[in-house]
Amino acid sequence: MVNQTSLAVWCQEKAWFLPSAGKRFTWDGHEYLKEPYDCQAQFQSYMKAAQLGFSEKAVLGAIHDCQYRLKSGVLYLIPTKTDVTDFSKGRFKPLLDENPELKAMVQETDAANIKRIGKAMLYLRGMRTTVGLKSVPADKVVFDEIDEAVPSMVDLAMKRMSHSEFQEVEALSTPTIPEYGIHAMFLESDQRHWFIRCDACGEFTCLELEFPNCIKRNHRGEYYRACKKCGAEISPANGVWVPSNGKGNGEGGKVGYRVSQLVSQYVPLATIMDEFRNTKFPADFWNSRLAQPYIEATHRLEVAYVLNLCSNFGMEGRDKGPCAMGIDTSAERLHVVAARVESGVPRVIWIGEHPWEDLDDLMERYNAYAVLDGVPEPDKARDFVKRHSGRAWACSYTNAVNKPERWDDAENRVTVYQTLAMDASHKILQEKKAILPRAMDEVQEFAKHCHNVARRKVEDEETGNVHFTWLKLADDHYRRAFNFLVLAMCRVPVTEHKDDSDKALEEYYDQMMSGELPGAFGGGY
């Protein structure tokens, strides 16, 4: 009798034929999958390399859950609408066609991407749009390649479970950038890795954590997996999952698995090592082969790099200016960055949080020309720019790719393509064309906010065109404010007057750029 509550037992005893593998279900060669098939945690994340069998696990799990456990059903999310159609025809349908008993469980509906299984429903949806989600009830959400999802889509999908007694989440994806998508979920989990036992000495080795030192060559020149202690060959079949983070709370909380192609018995180690040494696309290698997030240094700033722009000057409570000011807005608090501009270089003189009622005073104290976010609080922003017409502009973003900013002085508004603006302000920081105050608390918070955004390549679902976008990974208010400050720099009048502090600043900047003074923390980048 099949245990109808266990996916692992159900699949093993039924021995379903898997079209993608060309053979019947077995643990042989996929020993690392048995525990994930048994996992019943409410929140599960799988940070995986490509072609390791986790998508089959998610599909079989969705059918099993609808047939035996859930009431409303499963919302199964795939990157795009096109992917949904391909998934339904290329993965779901062949699985049913090859397994008549599975096919008998699934009832077709009027919609191609909705299936009735038992008393529950399986909804297949794309993750790039919210259309079609608002009326979908679910007990469980499966995010297949969650790193391709729009963040707002993830939030909306989670709300589809608000009235469910189950509220389960299963996310699987090849990772992309650090602290985003599946990697962010893995960091919040108990972080399980596959540790392989050495038959020679009894030591346990995790290939992902020891790479590349764990891959060695024998006397015939063949690669093999090596024990980190004695160097003997180890078999990926002889492993156990070990959590490394207590805050995931195990089965009752958030369980996460990381698994790479190093444990695959079907991907030659020679292929992995050759690509490791010779690839021209390191992100693809680390993501798809090693299940490790990766981002080029030019696409994300480290906190230390930003702090290396610090000077020995403190922040200034006022300045005769004229100054540029960037303001990131919200209902209650504003994040403000103000700077003097000398020879095109912003010298940041103030970073801080303020209430809306202080904003007029800040404009006067710094003789400021300001750009602020015009979206979250449009009425307050509109009233403010009217009061300071000719010196303040509300910013809105456009989807017109690579179009320069458009200033409307009559309406006190600037419209800009967000990625283009973020690229420009990022370049100023990356090329050390800015000077910060010394590293006090708010400056350190500014540096963190600069680190909390990352530039990523994306593909348009409708056209297939590739472009870049900036992702928010955590609080980024000061980074957004700096973006508005760089826009405001375009409208600051050019002045010839320089006092002694300006001259000292220029000397400091020249020394920093020449390498004589590498920055407040020494070393430099």
Image (cartoon, grey):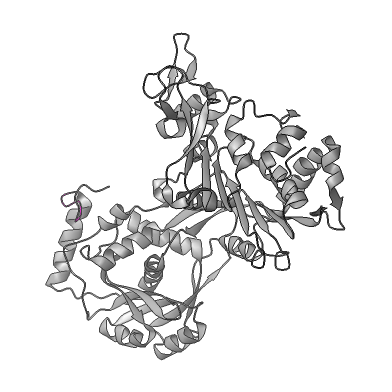
* Chain part drawn in magenta: 516-520
Whether 6 is drawn above or below 434: the answer is: above
Towards the viewer: 50 or 506? 50
**Does residue 335 appear to the left or right of 241 in the view shown?**
left
Q: Is residue 408 visible?
A: no
Residue 218 covered by magenta stretch: no
Point out residue 195 in the picture as x, y percentages from the top left corner.
Answer: 47, 31
Point out residue 318 in the picture as x, y percentages from the top left corner.
Answer: 22, 80
Towards the viewer: 517 or 53? 53
Point out residue 176 in the picture as x, y percentages from the top left corner.
Answer: 51, 46
Q: Residue at x 53, y 52 (%)?
A: 252
Q: Quadrant of the N terminus?
A: top right
Rendered image quadrant of residue 387:
bottom left
Q: Main secondary structure of the magenta part?
A: loop
**Does residue 94 appear to the left or right of 410 in the view shown?**
right
Farthest residue to the top: give it.
219
Q: Is residue 313 visible?
A: yes
How many marks the image carries: the answer is: 0
Point out residue 148 in the picture as x, y percentages from the top left corner.
Answer: 59, 52
Q: Residue at x 87, y 44 (%)?
A: 104
**Does residue 398 appear to the left or right of 138 in the view shown?**
left
Towards the viewer: 396 or 344? 396
Whether 46 is drawn above or below 431: the answer is: above
Whether 474 is drawn above or below 146: the answer is: below
Q: Residue at x 41, y 64 (%)?
A: 476
Rendered image quadrant of residue 336:
bottom left
